[in-house]
Image: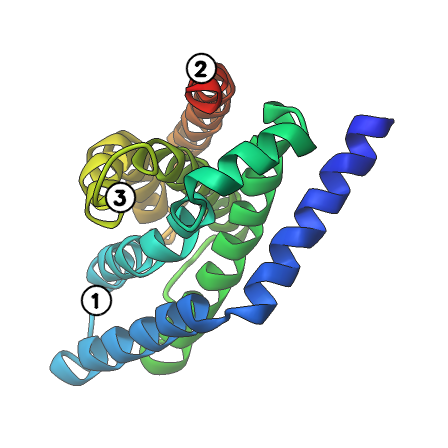
């Protein structure tokens, strides 16, 4: 119970810190709006598969810094302070929960922008949103963990994108495959296999994050 209350306090602290410095989230939203507008102006009559591909590309590149900053903004002195304040598991979970929330907010904004400028070609919303929820949870977890790893190196801001993009590639490929299947008028049953695979990858990512964060935190 004490751990849970400590976790809640840490999550609240993440929200309070971002409210004081909203520039990163604002920059991500502005970047999304600009890229979506450029995509619309360059090709107004876009087909469904290109719509889906552009959605994922813009989402990944616009959210990377916004999510990984959870740890990139933590200097060595703050690491030591956090280590005295709370167990490492709580620190990791607070960052991941806040990362999931931020990722969901930015994904919703990106989806609304795409729907406004280029329509919403999804034929099976239930399957699409199940897949979308699992994929963004996995992306948020990866960006948070990579941000923690990058803080231990010099030039962390450059290292985070280099490490993140290869790691999220399997998750994105499976997620895009499932998304493309929801564009068809007839929903094939294999889409649920893809969604289950995304869920399994999410579970693996969380387990690896918990295992790897312990020695990283003590370093």
Residue at 85% of width from left, 28% of height from top?
Answer: 2
Q: Quadrant of residue 1?
A: top right
Distance CA(mark 2)–CA(mark 3)? 18 Å
> In the drawing, what numbered circle is on residue 156?
3
Task: Classify mark 3: residues with Cα within 10 Å, few (<14), some (14-19) or many (20+).
Answer: many
How many numbered discs sit on the rendered protein?
3
Q: In terms of secondary structure, where does tag 3 sit?
A: helix
> In the drawing, what numbered circle is on residue 174?
none
- The residue identified by callout 2 is 215
Q: Nearer the viewer, mark 1 or mark 2?
A: 2
Distance CA(mark 1)–CA(mark 2)? 47 Å
In the picture, measured across the screen, residue 149 lies left or right of residue 1, that is: left
Q: In terms of secondary structure, where does tag 1 sit?
A: loop
Image quadrant containing the C terminus? top left
- The residue identified by callout 1 is 47
Closer to us: 180 or 132: 132
Q: Residue furthest bottom?
A: 41
> Picture coordinates of residue 67 (x, y %)?
42, 51
Residue at 54% of width from left, 46% of height from top?
Answer: 100
Q: Earlier in the sequence, mark 2 or mark 3?
A: 3
> Picture coordinates of residue 137 (x, y %)?
49, 40
**Labels 1 & 3 near each other (Cβ < 8 A):** no
Q: Residue furthest right?
A: 1
Q: Say whether residue 88 is visible.
A: yes
């Amino acid at each position: 119970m004490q751990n849970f209350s400590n976790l809640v306090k840490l999550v609240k602290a993440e929200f309070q810190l971002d409210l004081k410095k909203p520039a990163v989230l604002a920059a991500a939203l502005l970047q999304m709006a600009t890229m979506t507008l450029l995509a619309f102006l360059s090709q107004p009559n876009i087909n469904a598969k290109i719509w889906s591909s552009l959605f994922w590309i813009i989402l990944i590149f616009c959210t990377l810094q916004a999510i990984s900053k959870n740890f990139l903004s933590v200097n060595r002195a703050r690491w030591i302070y956090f280590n005295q304040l709370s167990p490492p598991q709580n620190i990791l979970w607070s960052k991941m929960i806040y990362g999931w929330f931020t990722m969901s907010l930015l994904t919703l904004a990106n989806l609304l922008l795409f729907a406004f400028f280029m329509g919403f070609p999804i034929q099976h919303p239930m399957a699409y949103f199940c897949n979308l929820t699992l994929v963004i949870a996995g992306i948020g977890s990866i960006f948070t963990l990579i941000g923690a790893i990058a803080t231990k190196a010099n030039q962390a801001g450059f290292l985070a994108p280099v490490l993140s993009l290869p790691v999220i590639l399997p998750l994105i490929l499976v997620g895009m495959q499932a998304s493309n299947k929801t564009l068809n008028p007839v929903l094939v049953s294999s889409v649920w296999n893809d969604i289950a695979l995304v869920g399994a990858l999410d579970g693996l990512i969380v387990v690896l994050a918990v295992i790897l964060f312990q020695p990283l935190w003590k370093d």
